[in-house]
Image (spheres, grey):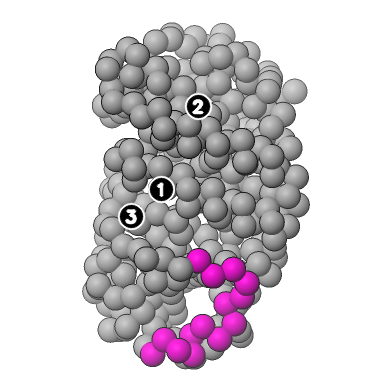
Amino acid sequence: MTEYVYGSVDGIGGSLGSYAVMTMDVPWNLVKDRIGGKPASITMISGLKHDYLDRLVNELPKVETVIGIGGGMANDAAKYFAWKRNCALILVPTIVSVNAYATPAAAVRELDGRVNYTGNVSPSKVIIDYAAIQAAPKRLNAAGTGDIYSCRTALFDWKLAHEKTGESYDEKIAAGSQRILDRLVGAADEIKNVTEKGIRTLVELHIETNRLQVLAGKARPEEGSEHIFFYTLENLTGKEFVHGEVVGTGIFVLTHFQSSEEDLVASVMDKMGLMFRPRDYGITHEQFINATVEMKRYAREKKMFFSVLDTVEISKDDAEELWRKLSA
């Protein structure tokens, strides 16, 4: 059972015995003088490729606990290490840009660039250090809304798949996802301003979306065609992006094909501070057009879940119209 501790990381290392730290320069500098104890090793995580993570598992000293300090990369690396080493795990997310601290599997990159969710491990504690999170750039914390607001497009796709293919669908779980959306939108100002209430709301909603996915036995309550846009863009460009921001673009794009309410979702994402426009994270016109047109093919090639992409044709003109709206 994971304990969520809201407040401060101060002194946590003093009671752990031998422990390893997996982090990055900026988050480590925020907490290194406060954490206490003396780590057996400090690893600055440089990626999540499978062979790299396996090398860390083989080379780092034996410890009783591993602490992941930072964003999704540090948290996922620590989860993988704890799972492989069968040691205790503590996570200290210093930004809440993704929900890695609230999920049991680690996002591991394979040689072909695909992300596999590997392992199953729960931390004994997740420490939400308000001061560290508030010291991060606001846009990185706002990015944490991407994997929550995605429930909007995901629920549409899930129900569509149920109607078109007979895929199992749970009304109670879907209603739970809708409540998550309502609470997220209601807290938009707090989230944008990274108040303690806003941080706690994001954390609690990340926990709840993960709980609903576990209940459903699949990612449908939170992951839909908006994520296919993200996967396609990374595949085409060979680049890694801030996950929630590109998912936000996917929400905008796929809402156009689901309900033509992309202007409404844009206003909500703006209110939350989510940087979802291509110019915000530096993709070009050509990259956007290619990803939008190619995502249907990509989903079919990778044998991904049924979604609105299976019911529409997307032309270059469609993509150009969306680019104009996003660039306005």
Q: Residue at x 28, y 15 (%)?
A: 165
Q: Nearer the viewer, residue 115 or 177?
A: 177
User: Marks 3/2: CA distance?
Assistant: 23 Å
Q: Residue at x 39, y 10 (%)?
A: 311
Q: Is residue 127 left or right of residue 271?
A: left
Q: Position of residue 199 (x, y in %)?
A: 64, 56
Q: Earlier in the sequence, mark 1 or mark 2?
A: 2
Give the SS element for disc 1.
helix
Q: Is residue 270 left or right of residue 220?
A: right
Please state which amino acid type lies under the numbered disc 3: Ala
Please state which amino acid type lies under the numbered disc 2: Thr
Residue tagged 1: 211
User: Marks 1/2: CA distance?
Assistant: 18 Å
Q: Quadrant of the N terminus?
A: bottom left
Q: Which mark is residue 105?
A: 3
Q: Position of residue 210 (x, y in %)?
A: 42, 47
Q: Which residues are drawn in magenta?
A: 4-17
Give the SS element for disc 3.
loop
Q: Nearer the viewer, residue 261 or 61?
A: 261
> Are discs 1 and 3 less than 8 Å apart at CB?
no
Find out whether residue 8 is within the magenta segment.
yes
Find out whether residue 179 is within the magenta segment.
no
Please state which amino acid type lies under the numbered disc 1: Arg
Quadrant of the rendered image containing residue 306:
top left
The reply to whether residue 138 is in sight is no
